[in-house]
Amino acid sequence: MNSALKLTALVLVFVQLLGAIHGGVYDNTNLWVASDKTLELPESAVLGGFDPYGYYIYVGRVVYSSSILPARIVPETGTATYNTESLSNSATSYQVLVANETVSYHWVRSFDGYREKNAVSVGTSATNDRVFVCRAKTDGALLVGTLYLAQRVCIIKYQDLPLRKFDKYEVLIRKKELLQWQPFGPSN
Ligand SMILES: *[C@@H]1O[C@H](CO)[C@@H](O)[C@H](O)[C@H]1NC(C)=O
């Protein structure tokens, strides 16, 4: 090994150690339900878009190499595809984001890594940065991607398609629903 290679190897080991210590922490603000091909998708799963084949994509997350990453879940095939800032991959077990009576999810237009209020984080990356959920229209599809605020772009790499970076995209945000107004609610 020449010294440059050695140094690279050392840095990689160090980054992985850092990741093991700090990275890959799941967000607990939202409700994520573990699922796979054998389970029916929860009724209130959050829609993310559609893939190039026309299948609906639901918002999910996976853990990959001490990063938690947004995932594109296609219930018909029971797969979740996802990407880091450089590579794409797929998983057969994943977590699905679900809404309920008090919390709903919406897509809002955003740009340049702006920190939208109540943006949905899936968890943290290997470098301990929070990872957010974005989406953009590309390749005949509407695909969920990975948003690292520091990089200021929504990164989408779907299967063998080229890596795409968007400085204008949509971000998933959480909204609290007001409970239905009750004229004679519980008195206390
Ligand atoms: C809805 O989900 C939120 C976030 O996960 C949770 O805090 C809240 O208790 C849930 N509400 C109901 C009615 O289940």
Image (cartoon, helix red, strand yellow):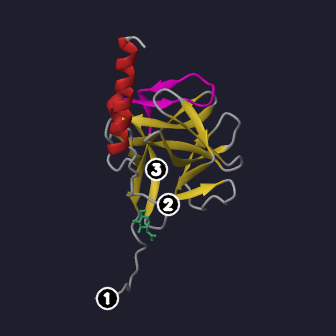
- Looking at marks 1 and 2 on the same chain, the residue that comes earlier in the sequence is marked by 2
Q: Which residues are magenta?
A: 152-170
How far apart in space, not on screen, are marks 3 and 1 (Cα)?
A: 33 Å
Residue named by callout 3: 106
Viewer-side residue, 151 vs 4: 4
Residue named by callout 1: 187
Q: Is 140 one of the magenta-colored residues?
A: no
Residue named by callout 2: 99
| CB under 8 Å between discs 1 and 2 | no
Mark 3 residue CB less than 8 A from any atom of ligand 1: no
Q: Which element is circle 2 on?
A: loop
Extreme residue in the bottom direction: 188
* Number of callouts: 3
| CB under 8 Å between discs 3 and 1 | no
| Closer mark to the observer between disc 1 and disc 2 | 2
- Looking at marks 2 and 3 on the same chain, the residue that comes earlier in the sequence is marked by 2
